[in-house]
Image (tube, helix red, strand yellow):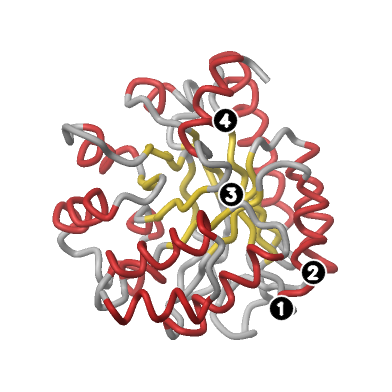
Amino acid sequence: MPATNKVRMNRLFGQGKCLDVAIDHGIANEPDFLSGLEDIERVMDNLIAAQPDAIQVNYGQADLLQNHTGRKPALVMRTDVGNAYNAARHREMWAVLHNPEAPILAALQLDAAAVVVNLYLIPDEPGILRMCIENIGRLRHACERYGMPLMIEPLVMAPAGQGAAYGSLGDVEKMVPLVRLARELGADIIKADPTDNVDDFHRVVEAARCPTLVRGGGKGEIGAVLTKSAALMAQGASGMVYGRNVYQHDNPARVVSALMAIIHQGISGQDALNLYQQG
């Protein structure tokens, strides 16, 4: 790992763990994802004040974080866009890099600590898996050259008609090979769904062999979210990448405080809920 890569990794995992709050959902072109993100400047200001370890955004919103003066979370920048999250099934599934010719140029210019890209496994859609692998290959080359950590998000997606059109699954038997593929392709960090059975998540961590952050998915009841988060940390997770489970709750700053206490202090889900309720 290049020295500059380690420097950036230290910005994310300075205490060995990381809470990355994702507000990059505008790239999905899905209205439901934008609930709570309408005033993105206010959301960013509130999150900076709450001080998670990192904030994950797309290029067009990164200035709201990096133009902020004073102490602030690290920037994680998404590099790809696709149509896998829309409610309707598409005739053609695709995932492309924002800038395939210089895929991490913007991240370097804006002093990001890491970049993130998807690795989709969608039933009967081998083309999108190939696109994701090609995207990762371009990114890996650039990341290695310039010392940028690469976060890969391996997602096992549900067949059309099973729940949301392309909801992701926590089937550990399907997740482990895809996580292993992400690591084989050069992931420095894995962002993975929780397993259906939380006690199986250690298998994902073992397949990753690098820091493994848990993806949040849709908004859940706060007590259940905190309890599950603590259980996942006990299974070896290095932290969380939560979006809707932060910004769609009534008090995102309290959610951040509760999650930071779970991740960095090792408190229980119940103690975290008490912290959240006390404000």
What amino acid is labelled 1 in the image?
Asp
Q: Secondary structure at mark 2?
A: helix
Quarter of the image for residue 142 reads top right
What mark, if any, has residue 172 been given in the picture?
Answer: 2
Are the residues flagged by discs 4 and 1 in contact, CB closer than 8 Å? no
Q: Are marks 4 and 3 in contact (CB under 8 Å)?
A: no
Picture quadrant where residue 189 is located = top right
> Counting residues from the N terminus, which is met first, the one under dot 4 or under dot 1?
4
Residue indicated by mark 3: 118
Q: Gap in Å between the C-alphas at discs 4 and 2?
A: 25 Å
* Residue 109: assigned label: none
SS at badge 4:
loop
Percent coordinates x, y for residue 241 in the rendering = 50, 56
Mark 4 or mark 3: which is in front? 4
- Image marks 4 and 2: residues in contact by CB distance under 8 Å: no
Is disc 4 surrounded by few (<14), some (14 to 19) or many (20+) residues within 10 Å?
Answer: many
Residue plotted at (64% across, 58% down): 192
Q: Which residue type carries mark 2?
A: Val
Q: Considering the image in quadrants, where does the C terminus appear?
A: bottom left
Which of the two discs, 4 and 2, labels the residue nearer the N terminus? 4
Residue at image mark 1: 196
Q: Which residue shows up at 36% across the image and 74% down it?
A: 275
Q: What distance separates the C-alpha of mark 4 from that of mark 1?
A: 28 Å
Seen from the viewer's position, the closer of residues 179 and 242 is: 242
Near-viewer residue (72 or 120)? 72
Residue 139 at x, y percent in the picture: 59, 29
Of the pair 141 and 14, the residue shown nearer to us: 14
Q: Identify residue for label 4.
A: 149
Amino acid, disc 3 = Asn
